Image (cartoon, rainbow, N blue to C red):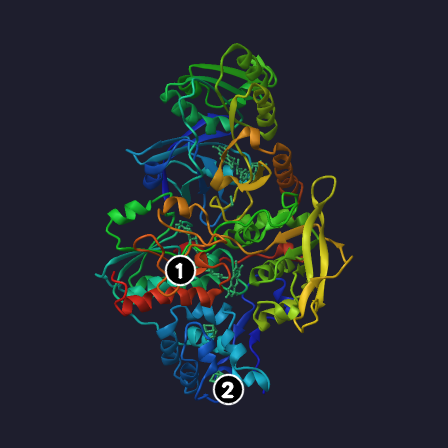
C-alpha cells in the first residue's frame, strides 16, 4: 500500500498526488513512469513521475480525470492509499547540454515534460517552454513551468488566454528566431508529427514521448507497440522517449484510433456472456 | 479399460462462467483409477516424467487410501503438485503402458487428487528462520517457485523478487481461472512462504534493484527465473491494425483485474469472429476465454491436429465448447479494411508431401492454396522471447542465437559469476514440468556440494 500524503486540485479535473514509495523515489529519473493501480484488483494505468524526492521517499503524479481509472485515483483522499505503484519503468529521458532547448507539450503532456524541463535547466541549457491547452481553465502547471524554463509561451485553442492557436505555430516562430539545438515534444500524435515536420528540414534533433496505450509496462503484453525506423518496438521498455524523426506517426495514429473506437463507442455487452460475473478469489490478499 | 469419469462442468454451463472447468476425480473414482495401475516393475511413466516422480509409489498410497502420504511422496520430487496436477502436459501419460490397450492411467488427475485431498492442515504456522547462504531468485513463475522451495528445504535463506504485484508468473497472469484457480495459487505460495521463503513483489531486478545491490546485500547467488517476458513482435505483418491483440495483453486483462476485464469485454463488444493464431496451451486458453465472451473462435495453426502440444483432455474440452480448429493453415499476413481494422488473415494451406520420395513426409505448402480467413479480431499467441534488457543489467550474461540466456547444461550456470538461470528464460520451448526440472538441476548440484552457496 502506498499512502497519499498530499493532494492538490490544480485545475478543473486535474489533480496532483504525492505518495510515499521509497524504493521508487530513490531510483526515479526524469522521463520515467509508473503503473498505478488505484484500488485493489482494479484497473491500472501508466502515469509519468512528475517529481520524486528520495529524502522524503515520495513521488508525485499529476493527472487529468478522463475516464474510470483516473477518476477513481482522483477520488482518493489524503491518508488513504493507492493499492499498487509499480516502477520506475521506461528509459530515463536523454538529458544533455545541447545549448538552446525547446520543451513543448500540450494537455496532460505538460505533466510529463515538467521533470524534463527541470533537468534540462539543471544541465545549463537555455530552456524555452511552449505549452498549450484547449482553454484557459484546462491549462496545467503554468507556474511550475515558468520556474522550470527560461522563457515560457502559452497558447489556447479558443484564445481565452495568451495566444490563440497551437504550440506548433509557436515552435515555428521560435525556430525562426533562435538557434535551437534540441526539441522535446510531448503531446498528441498530430502535434508531435507536425513538430517533427518542422524540425526535420532544419536537422534539429527532436525527441518525443510515445503516448501509446500501455498495460503491463514491462515489455510483456505488446500493447504499447509502435513502429520506429520500420521496426516494431515496445514503448514501455525501449521508450517512452524516441527520436521523433524515426517514428512512424501514421501507424501510431492507427494504433491510438483502434483503441479509441473499441473502448468508447461500445455499450455494455448484453449477450449471455455480458452479464457473467468474473470471480477473483482472494487474489489480492497476498 | 477406460478411465472413470471426472467431475466436469457441463458444456452448456461452463461457457457461461469463468470457474474451473474440471474438478478431478471423486474419492471413489480416484481409488478405482489408482487400482487400475498394475504397478509396473519398470515404470516407463516415471522415466517420462521430467521430475522423476515415483508414480507407481504415489498411486499405491492412493489406492491404500493414505492421501497425505501419497502427496508427501509426490512432494519429494515436485514442490508444486497442485499446479502440475492441473496443467502439466503429462508426458507420463503418453508413456504409460496401458495406453496401448486403452486409456492410460490418468496420472495427472491422480496427482491433483492427492494435492487436493492430501493436504494436512497442520497447526504449525510459524515461518522457520533459515540460516543458510542468502540466495536471490528473480521471478516467481513455476521455475522460480521450484528453486525457492527446494533451496529452502536445504536451509538456504531464499528471497524471491517479483516485478509484478502478484506471485506465480504465467500461472497467475497467463493461465486463466478455468484451468488454474487463483485460490490454489494463493495456498501454494502461502505454503512456500511457510517453508521459509521470503517474497518481495514490485521489485524488478535491473530497475528497482540492481544486481550490484544484491551482491552488496550479501546474496551469494542470483538465480534468474524470469521467463519469456518479451513480446515477440515482427512475426506477422499487420499487427498494428485495430482488433489485433497479443495473447498476453488479452490474458492479463482477463486474469488480473475485474475492472480491466469489464473493459476488455467492452473492447470485444464489436468483434464476432475471432482467429487465434497459435497452437499451444496459450492459444487454447485465449480461445476458451473468447468462447466465454460469446464469440465464434477458430484456432489457426500450421501443424496437423494430431501434433498439437496440448493435453488430450484439454483439447477434448475445448472442442466440446465449440472452438474450431483450422489445422495445417499457415497465417502469413493480417489484412485490414479502410478504417485500419483487421478483417481477415491471409493464409496458406499445408499438407503432407514426400518431396524427395524417400519416405520423409513433411508438411509443405499446397501450391495456389492462398486464401483469406475472415475474422474481425485476431489474437496472436505465438512464442515469446526473454526480456532483452536482462543483458544490459547483468554484466557477463551471454545469449544463444535465439536470444535465450546461455547456461551450462548440467549446472544451469551462466558465464556471469554466481548467476544461474532456469526455466523458460534459458529455452523458449519449455512447458511447466520442464521448467521445473531445469530448476531442480541447481538443487541437485547444491546437494552434491558441486555448487557451494
Ligand atoms: C508513459 C505514459 C505516461 C503518462 N503520463 C500521464 C500523466 O502524467 N498524466 C496524465 O494525466 N496522463 C498520463 N498518461 C495517460 C494516462 O495513462 C491515461 O490518461 C489514463 O490511462 C486514462 O485512463 P482512464 O481509465 O482514466 O480513462 P479512459 O477512459 O480509459 O481513457 C481516456 C484516454 O486515455 C488514454 N488511455 C487510456 N488507457 C491508457 C493506457 N493504458 N495507456 C495510455 N493511455 C491510455 C486514451 O487516449 C483514452 O482515450 C500517460 C500515458 C503514458 C503511456
Ligand atoms: C496462457 C499460457 C498457458 C500455458 N499453459 C501451459 C500448460 O497448460 N502446460 C504447460 O506445461 N505449460 C503451459 N504454458 C507454458 C508455461 O506456463 C511456461 O513454460 C512456464 O510458466 C515458464 O515458467 P518460468 O518460471 O520460466 O517463467 P514465468 O512463468 O514467465 O515467470 C517469470 C516471472 O519472472 C518475473 N520477472 C521477469 N523479469 C523480472 C525481473 N527483472 N525482476 C523480477 N521479476 C522478474 C515475471 O514477472 C514473472 O512473474 C502456458 C503458457 C501460457 C502463456
Ligand atoms: S509432473 Fe507431469 S509428467 Fe510428472 S507425473 Fe505429474 S503429470 Fe506426469
Ligand atoms: S506405466 Fe502406467 S501402468 Fe505402469 S506404473 Fe506407470 S502409470 Fe502404472
Ligand atoms: S505495456 Fe505491455 S509491452 Fe509495453
Q: How many marks?
A: 2
Depicted A103 relative to depicted A2: above or below: above
User: Within 8 Å: ligand 2 and the Cβ of disc 1?
Assistant: yes
Residue A245, placed above or below residue B126: above
> Is B12 or B350 nearer to us in this picture?
B350
- Local secondary structure at mark 2: helix
- At 54% from the left and 18% from the top, the residue drawn is A136
Q: Looking at the image, which residue is at 64% across and 56% down?
A: B276
Is residue B408 shown above or below A257?
A: below
Q: Position of residue B408 (x, y in %)?
A: 38, 61
Q: Chain of mark 1?
A: B
Residue corresponding to mark 1: B422
Q: List x then y, in percent, for residue B267.
A: 63, 47
User: Badge 2 local density, few (<14 within 10 Å), some, or many (20+)?
Assistant: some
**In terms of sequence position, does the residue under pointer 2 or pointer 1 come before the other?**
2
Residue B192 visible somewhere in the drawing: no
* Secondary structure found at label 1: loop
* B291 left or right of B74 in image: right
Q: Nearer the viewer, mark 2 or mark 1?
A: 1
Which quarter shows the C terminus of chain B?
bottom left
Name the residue furthest top. A177
Image quarter of residue A159: top right
Q: Are marks 2 and 1 on the same chain?
A: yes
Chain identity of mark 2: B
Q: What residue is at 32 percent from the left and 47 percent from the top?
A: B211
Amino acid at each position: 500500500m502506498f499512502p497519499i500524503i498530499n493532494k492538490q486540485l490544480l485545475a478543473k479535473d486535474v489533480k496532483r498526488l504525492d505518495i510515499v514509495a521509497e524504493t521508487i523515489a530513490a531510483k526515479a529519473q526524469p522521463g520515467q513512469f509508473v503503473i498505478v493501480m488505484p484500488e485493489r484488483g482494479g484497473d491500472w494505468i501508466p502515469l509519468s513521475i512528475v517529481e520524486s524526492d528520495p529524502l522524503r521517499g515520495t513521488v508525485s503524479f499529476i493527472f487529468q480525470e478522463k475516464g474510470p481509472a483516473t477518476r477513481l485515483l482522483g477520488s482518493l483522499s489524503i491518508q488513504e492509499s493507492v493499492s499498487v505503484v509499480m516502477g520506475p519503468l521506461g528509459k530515463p529521458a536523454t538529458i544533455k547540454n545541447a545549448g538552446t532547448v525547446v520543451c513543448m507539450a500540450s494537455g496532460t503532456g505538460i505533466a510529463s515534460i515538467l521533470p524534463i524541463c527541470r533537468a534540462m535547466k539543471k544541465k545549463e541549457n537555455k530552456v524555452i517552454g511552449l505549452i498549450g491547452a484547449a482553454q484557459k481553465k484546462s491549462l496545467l502547471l503554468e507556474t511550475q513551468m515558468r520556474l522550470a524554463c527560461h522563457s515560457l509561451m502559452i497558447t489556447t485553442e479558443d484564445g481565452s488566454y495568451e495566444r490563440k492557436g497551437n504550440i506548433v505555430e509557436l515552435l515555428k516562430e521560435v525556430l525562426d528566431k533562435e538557434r535551437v539545438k534540441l526539441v522535446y515534444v510531448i503531446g498528441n500524435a498530430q502535434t508531435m508529427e507536425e513538430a517533427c515536420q518542422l524540425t526535420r528540414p532544419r536537422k534539429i534533433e527532436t525527441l518525443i514521448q510515445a503516448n501509446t496505450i500501455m498495460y503491463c509496462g514491462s515489455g510483456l503484453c505488446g500493447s504499447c507497440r509502435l513502429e520506429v525506423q520500420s521496426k516494431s518496438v515496445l514503448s514501455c521498455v525501449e521508450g517512452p522517449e524516441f527520436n521523433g524523426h524515426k517514428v512512424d506517426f501514421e501507424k501510431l495514429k492507427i494504433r491510438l484510433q483502434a483503441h479509441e473506437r473499441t473502448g468508447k463507442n461500445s455499450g455494455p455487452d448484453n449477450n449471455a456472456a455480458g452479464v457473467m460475473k468474473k470471480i477473483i478469489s482472494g487474489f489480492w490478499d497476498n | 479399460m477406460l478411465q472413470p469419469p471426472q467431475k466436469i462442468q457441463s458444456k452448456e454451463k461452463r461457457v457461461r462462467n469463468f470457474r474451473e472447468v474440471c474438478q478431478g476425480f471423486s474419492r471413489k473414482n480416484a481409488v478405482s483409477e489408482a487400482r487400475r495401475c498394475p504397478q509396473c516393475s519398470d515404470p516407463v511413466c516415471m522415466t517420462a516424467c521430467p521430475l522423476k516422480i515415483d508414480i507407481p509409489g504415489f498411486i499405491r498410497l492412493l489406492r491404500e487410501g493414505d492421501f497425505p502420504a501419497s502427496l508427501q511422496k509426490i512432494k519429494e520430487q515436485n514442490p508444486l503438485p497442485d499446479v502440475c496436477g492441473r496443467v502439466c502436459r503429462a508426458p507420463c501419460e503418453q508413456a504409460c503402458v496401458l495406453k496401448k490397450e486403452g486409456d492410460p492411467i490418468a496420472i495427472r488427475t491422480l496427482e491433483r487428487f492427492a494435492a487436493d485431498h492430501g493436504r494436512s492442515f497442520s497447526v504449525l504456522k510459524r515461518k522457520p528462520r533459515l540460516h543458510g547462504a542468502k540466495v536471490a531468485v528473480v521471478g516467481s513463475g513455476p521455475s522460480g517457485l521450484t528453486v525457492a522451495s527446494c533451496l529452502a528445504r536445504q536451509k538456504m535463506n531464499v528471497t524471491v523478487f517479483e516485478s509484478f504485484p502478484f506471485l506465480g508468473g504465467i500461472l497467475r497472469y497467463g493461465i486463466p481461472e478455468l484451468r488454474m484457480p487463483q485460490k490454489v495459487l494463493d495456498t501454494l505460495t502461502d505454503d512456500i512462504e511457510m517453508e521459509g521463503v521470503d517474497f518481495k513483489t514490485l521489485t524488478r531486478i535491473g530497475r528497482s534493484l540492481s544486481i550490484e545491490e544484491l551482491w552488496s546485500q550479501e546474496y551469494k547467488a542470483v538465480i534468474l527465473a524470469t521467463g519469456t517476458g518479451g513480446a515477440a513482435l515482427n512475426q506477422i505483418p499487420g499487427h498494428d491494425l485495430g482488433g489485433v491483440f497479443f495473447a498476453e495483453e488479452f490474458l492479463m486483462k482477463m486474469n488480473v483485474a475485474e475492472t480491466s476485464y469489464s473493459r476488455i469485454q467492452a473492447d470485444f463488444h464489436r468483434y464476432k469472429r475471432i482467429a487465434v493464431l497459435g497452437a499451444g496451451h496459450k492459444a487454447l486458453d485465449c480461445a476458451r476465454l473468447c468462447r466465454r465472451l460469446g464469440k465464434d473462435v477458430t484456432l489457426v495453426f500450421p501443424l496437423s491436429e494430431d501434433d498439437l502440444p496440448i493435453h488430450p483432455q484439454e483439447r477434448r474440452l475445448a472442442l466440446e465448447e465449440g472452438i474450431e480448429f483450422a489445422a495445417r493453415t499457415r497465417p502469413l499476413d493480417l489484412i485490414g479494411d479502410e478504417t485500419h481494422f483487421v478483417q481477415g488473415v491471409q493464409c496458406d494451406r499445408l499438407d503432407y508431401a514426400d518431396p524427395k520420395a524417400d519416405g520423409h513426409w513433411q508438411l509443405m505448402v499446397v501450391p495456389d492454396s492462398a486464401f483469406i480467413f475472415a475474422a474481425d479480431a485476431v489474437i496472436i499467441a505465438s512464442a515469446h522471447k526473454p526480456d532483452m534488457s536482462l543483458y544490459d543489467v547483468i554484466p557477463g550474461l551471454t545469449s544463444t542465437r535465439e536470444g535465450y540466456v546461455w547456461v551450462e547444461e548440467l549446472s544451469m550456470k551462466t558465464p556471469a559469476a554466481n548467476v544461474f538461470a532456469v526455466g523458460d528464460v534459458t529455452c523458449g520451448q519449455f512447458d511447466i514440468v520442464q521448467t521445473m526440472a531445469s530448476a531442480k538441476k541447481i538443487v541437485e548440484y547444491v546437494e552434491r556440494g558441486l555448487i557451494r552457496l
